Image (cartoon, rainbow, N blue to C red):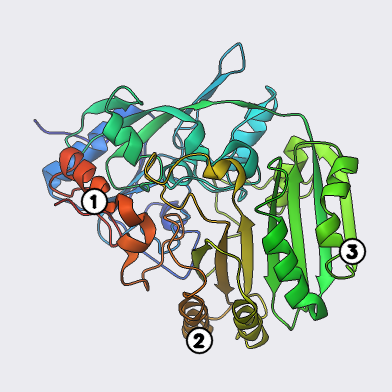
Amino acid sequence: MGNVKLTGRIVVPGDHDYEEAREEFNTRYSLYPCVIVFCQNTEDVVNAVKWAKQKNIPFRVRTGRHSYEAYSSLDGGLVIDISEMNAVRVTEDKRLISVQAGALLLPLYTELYDQGVTIPGGTCPSVGLAGLTLGAGWGMLTRKYGMLCDRLLALEMVTADGKIIFATDEWNSDLFWACRGGGGGNFGIVTKFLFQAVRVDQVAIYKIVWPWSGFKKVVDAFQRFAPCTDKRLTGILDIYTKEIGELKSLGEFLGSKDELRKLLTPLLQAYPPKEVEIQEVPYIDAVRIFGGLMPGMKEYDIGHGDPDAHPFKNTGAFAKTFLPSKGIKILKYFLEHSPSIENKVQLQALGGSARKKKPNQTAYVHRDALFSLLYITKWQESREAKKNVKWVEKMRDTLLPFADGAYVNFHDNCICNWLEQAYGSNLHRLQEVKTKYDPHDEFTFPLGIPPY
C-alpha cells in the first residue's frame, strides 16, 4: 500500500477549530477524536480509509453529525467528515440531480429550488444527505414521492479496501439494494448520489392547533386521516406535554389551499381547533417553515456550529394498525407525567407512495406502516438526563404492543434487539452484503450490521 498520507482539511487536538470540529448535534455526548479530516473530494476519502487501515486506527464516518447516539464520532480515533463535499448538478432537462454525499439539507434544497427542482428529503436544516438517504429518508413529500431512497438511481462508494465503486440496479445491485434503507456507515463511504428529480414551485401548507382537552379525539382523527388521505398530502402531529397543553398538526400539500381545506375536513371536525392556518407558499418557504425557520429569516451558518444543537434522547417505532383507545391513553399518561416541558411525541404519516414497494424490494423493511412515532425528550441540565431517558424509553416499551420496529435513522442504544427491530426480514440479506463488501467489519459502530 505504501505510506499513505491524510489529505483534505485536517483538524487535531490543540487546533483553534478543534472544539467546533468535534461537536455533535446531540450535545449529550462529548467525544474527542485524535484526528478529524474534512474531505474535499473522493480521493481524500480513499486516503482516509487507507490511512486508518495502515495505522490500525478505528474510524467513523460523519456528514451532518445528527446520529442520535453520536455514532458518527469516537474517542481517540479518526473521524472522516464529508460535509465539505457538497457540489450539486442538475441536468439540463431537470430530470436528474447529481450531488456529492456531504450536502446538508437546507443549502441543498435552496440550490435545487433555484433550478425548479427538489428531492423528497427530510426537514431538519442541518441533517446530512448521506445518512438520511441511506436510512431510507422520510420528509414532507414522502406520501407523494415515496422515501428518499426510492428516488435514488445510483451511488459512488469508497469501500473498506479503499477502492471506488459504483452501484445501481444493474451494477453491484446487491449493494445498491442494501444502501436503500440499510443505514449509513455499514458498507462503505458513499461520496456521490444520483437522484430522480422532483419539480416544485408553489405548495399549500397547513397548521392546526388544538387544546389539550381534545387529546383523544384529535390523535384518533389524525391517525385515521393522515395515512389514508390524498397522497399529495403529508402530515405530522406534534403532541406536547400537558404543561404546554397543545396538539399541533402541520402538513404540506401539492395542490391549492382551497383543495387542501376540503381535504382537512376530518381534522377540522374532530375537535374545535383554537388555531387554523392554511396558505399557499413557494416550496422553499415551506422547507424553511418545517425546518423551524421563517421565510426571509437570515440563515445561520450550518458549517460553523449548529445553534440548534442540544442534549436529547430520541427513539421511535412504527404503527401498522391504528392505536386503540388504550394506546392513546398510554400516550396521554406519559405526556401528563413528563419530567421536561420540552418533551413531545410526533406522529409522521406514511402510506401513499411509501407503500408502493414491497418490504424486500429495498433494505427499508417498514413499508406496511401507517405512520411512525418519534418519541422526543430534551433537557437543559445534565442532572436531568437520567429521568428523561428513563421516561422516553419506558414510553416506547409500554407502547410496544401497538407500535414496534425501529427506524434506522433513529439510533437507540437501549433497544437490545436493534438489528431485528430495524431490519426485520431483511437482516439476513444485509449481513450477506456486509460480508461481501466489508468482511473484516472495518466500518463498525455499536448498532452496525455485523458480517457473518
Q: Is residue 432 visible?
A: yes
**Looking at numbered disc 1 in the image, what kind of residue is underneath it?**
His
Residue positioned 41% across, 29% down in the render:
192
Q: Residues within 10 Å of mark 3 (few under 14, many from 20)?
A: few
**Looking at numbered disc 3 in the image, what kind of residue is underneath it?**
Glu
Ranked by sequence position, the earlier of labels 3 and 2 is 3
Mark drawn on residue 275: 3
Q: Secondary structure at mark 3?
A: strand
What's the distance in space between the residues labelled 3 and 1, CA to CA?
48 Å
From the image, tell me which residue sits under label 1.
Answer: 428
x then y, percent, for residue 136: 46, 45
What's the distance in space between the residues labelled 3 and 2, CA to CA?
33 Å
Name the outermost residue toward the left. 2
Position of 348 relative to 165 (above/below): below
**Looking at numbered disc 2 in the image, what kind of residue is underneath it?**
Lys
x then y, percent, for residue 93: 61, 12
* Quadrant location, the N terminus: top left
Q: Residues within 10 Å of mark 2 (few under 14, many from 20)?
A: few
Residue positioned 43% across, 57% down in the render:
67
What's the distance in space between the residues labelled 2 and 1, CA to CA?
36 Å
From the image, tell me which residue sits under label 2.
Answer: 387
Along the line of sight, the residue nearer the viewer: 276 or 118 = 276
Q: Secondary structure at mark 2?
A: helix
x then y, percent, for residue 17: 45, 51
Residue positioned 74% across, 65% down in the render:
221
